[in-house]
Image: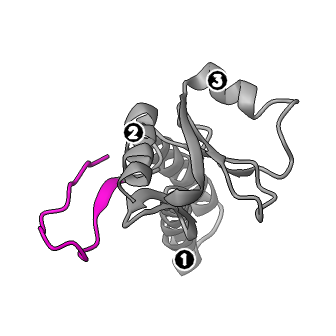
Amino acid sequence: MSLSPSSSSAPSAARTEYVERLGVPWWYWLAGLAFAGLLAVELWMGAPGLRSWLPFVLLLPATGAALAWLGRIRVAVHDGELWVDDARLPVRFVADAVPLDAAGRREVLGVGSDPLAFMVQRPWIGGAVQVVLDDPADPTPFWVVSTRHPVELAAAIMAARDAG
């Protein structure tokens, strides 16, 4: 996570208050590549000649691509909007931003959750922020977004709303 205030003093300049990438932990990379390597070794022992190296050429890059894809989501508060991957929410429609720990996230996402809520969750990230909406034209009652720093993200959302 990086909190990067705007360095420009121009009023029309775009401002980024919060940016975070929801990447997988380092040990996912270690475990994933080790598993792919072991599978490639098993296949390598059963095939003679040039075909024996094909599992290494295919499995290791595919595992790396899959892990990179899993960690692609970016969360940002930028220029008066909350960006979660390709979804954007103007902060003027935010009524409240509630930081959640792992227990609070489990409660919000549990049995009593609203099926119309917008959720972007990563199971390897314990915290989240519940963004309650105040838009009569939108049936979505709230957003729940995974984050490693829920207090900072909630503060950035509220600061952007109050500034706009």
107 left or right of 65?
right
43 left or right of 67?
right
- Dot 1: within a 10 Å radius of its alpha carbon, few (fewer than 14), some, or many (20 or more) residues? few
* Image mark for residue 155: 2
Hey, what amino acid is under mark 2? Ala
Give me the C-alpha separation between circle 2 and circle 3.
17 Å
Hey, what amino acid is under mark 1? Gly
Q: Is residue 129 above or below residue 134?
A: above
- Write the residue at 80% across / 30% down: 110
Return the disc, 1 or 3, that comes first in the chain's sequence: 1
* Image mark for residue 104: 3
Quadrant location, the C terminus: bottom left
* Image mark for residue 88: none
| Residue 4 sits inside the magenta stretch | yes
- Write the residue at 70% across / 58% down: 135
Callout 1: helix, strand or loop?
helix
Q: Position of residue 152 (x, y in %)?
A: 37, 37
Q: Main secondary structure of the magenta part?
A: loop
Q: Position of residue 41 (x, y in %)?
A: 54, 54
Q: Position of residue 77 (x, y in %)?
A: 41, 57
Magenta stretch in the rendered image = 1-18
- Dot 2: within a 10 Å radius of its alpha carbon, few (fewer than 14), some, or many (20 or more) residues? some
Q: Is residue 25 above or below residue 104?
A: below
Furthest residue toward top: 103
| Residue 73 visible in the current orientation | no
Callout 3: helix, strand or loop?
helix
- Write the residue at 48% across / 51% down: 33
Q: Position of residue 15 (x, y in %)?
A: 28, 65
